Every structure is written in structure tokens, then in C-alpha cells.
Image (tube, rainbow, N blue to C red):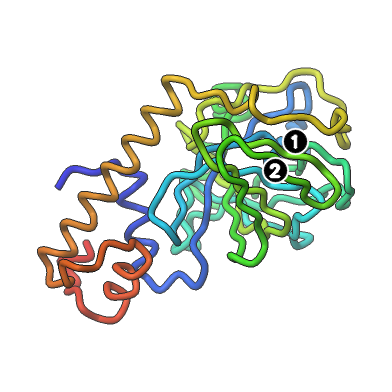
Amino acid sequence: MEITNQLRDECIQALRNQPQPVYLREANLVANTLDKDQRRVQWTLTTEDPALVYDWNTGRVVLEVLLMCGAEFEDQTPLLRDHNQYSVTAILGSVTEHPGRQRRIARLLGWLNFGELLDDTSESIWRRVAQGHLRRGSVGYDHSRKNYVTIPAGETQTVIGRSFTAPKDRDLRVVTKWRLREFSMVVIPVDARAQAKYQQPRGTQELPGQESLAELTAPNATSSNQQRSTEDGMKKFLAFLHAAGLNASIKSTEEALTWARSGNLSADQIT
């Protein structure tokens, strides 16, 4: 079975009794904010731009908008490498100084604070950031089913006083409450559509007036290829579980993962 490294890691994570699946999306460095003395740099952790994410509940790739007014986070968020949530040595430092939740924020900022003398790997990652070679990261977050609204393709709905229009070919999920779990330095983030942001002042960016998301969510070759790759990978993953003993009538990814978490796989199969 051939699956991408990212998909493999996500599947293993799910099998390790993760209490709430973690969703991932790209985040970018805010230019001219590097502070070498304090070993920190400011990052746009995430925005309200729509992004394609894998839905653990349905097994489909969905288009999702995170409302910044619904963000929940602690004063100190783990800064990791490669979304490795199962090793303390993967901690590079902490993310701090998030702006306060406001109704009209368009992005969530944070300062990435790199620890000192943690280990050789952490130090080498910091040097790549300081020298400008590593400019992208990825945010990890979660939310529950009761905290989002799904707008059918081509339809318009008002969510918390704002109007959203789904593209003609895809449903749009608007998340009203979500939790920041971690931030990771990565080589290739999940959402390849995001662009680096230059000369942005520290603080918040105001949203334009209520508007349709149809133009923002127009399909492109990159997003289509990413969707096909993820969906094909999950079909292969389900086929693997069926071969390992999962009832062939089970097609839901959520049901399949529940079966896998219940001790039905050997350690070799999980690996």
C-alpha cells in the first residue's frame, strides 16, 4: 500500500487513541519580524481564507473557513517540528502573544519563541529560520461537530451575522469555535495555496465587508491534485483495514478508525 508520509502519520496518529483529530493548514512568516537576540519571529498562524482539509468524520476532503472570533488558545502553545505530538524532543519552543479574539480579525498572529540549547536538531532548525531558508509552517487545531455550519454548494447562508457563499462545486464548512493545539515547522505545509505575507504590521487585519467566497474558492490544479491524492490514500487505508479483518460493509473512515483503535490491529500492522 503506497500512501504519502503525511497521510501515514495522520493515520498512525488516529490509531494512537487521539481524543480529537487534529486538522492542519499552512501558515506563513511575517516578514521583517526576526529577532535574533530574543530567538523569536512572528508568524501568521492561520487566516480566514478557505482551505481544503481532510474531514475525519466523513472521510472526505472539505473546504473550510475558520472564524478568528472563535479561536481558543492558551498563553503558551507548543512549537513542534513536523507535527510530532508524541515526543517531548520534538518541542522547539513555544508560541506566545496571540492577539485577543475580536469579531472582525482576518488572521491569527503569534510569536514563535525558539528554546536555547535544547538539542542539535532544534538548533539547526532555528538557524534555518534565522537565515531565511525556512519560511513556512503549519498550524494544528481541532473542533467538534457542533461548532461548525455546512453550507451546501452554491448556496449562501448567514453565520454569526456574516454572509458566506459556497462555491458551485463544493460545500463550505464555516467553523465558529476551534482550538489551537500546536504549531509546527515543516518543509511543505498542507495548504499550498497560501502565499508569504510581506510588510504586515503586528496586530490584526480588518476584514472587508460581507462578501462571497466563491472567487476565493475557485478550484485550481494544485487543490484538485491534493484532494485526489488524499482521497485515494484514504481509500487505500480502508482497503488495508478490510484486509486486516474490518467488516467489508464498513465504508466510513470514522467507523474504521474506531474499529482499529479497539485493539484489532497488531503492533506490526499499526507500523
Q: Is residue 99 left or right of residue 171?
A: right
Q: Is residue 39 left or right of residue 101?
A: left
Residue farthest along the front direction in this orientation: 155
Residue 138: x percent and y percent? 56, 41
Element type where label 2 sits in the image:
strand
Residue 68: x percent and y percent? 77, 47
Tell whether label 2 touches label 1 (CB within 8 Å). Answer: yes
Q: Is residue 71 left or right of residue 193?
A: right
* Amino acid type, callout 1: Gln
Residue 130: x percent and y percent? 64, 28
Q: Nearer the viewer, residue 128 or 119?
A: 128
**Badge 1 or badge 2: first in the primary sequence:** 1
Could one spot residue 124 in this view of the protein?
A: no
Q: In percent of the image, x 48 and y 60: which residue is there? A: 85
Q: Nearer the viewer, residue 66 or 141?
A: 66
Label 1 crowd (10 A; few <14 / some 14-19 / many >=20) = many
Q: In percent of the image, x 77 and y 32: which residue is there? A: 35
Q: Is residue 139 left or right of residue 234?
A: right
Q: What is the C-alpha distance between the residues marked 1 and 2?
A: 6 Å
Element type where label 1 sits in the image:
strand
Residue 99: x percent and y percent? 86, 47
Could one spot residue 261 in this view of the protein?
A: yes
* Amino acid type, callout 2: Leu
Residue carrying label 1: 42
Residue 112, numbered label: 2
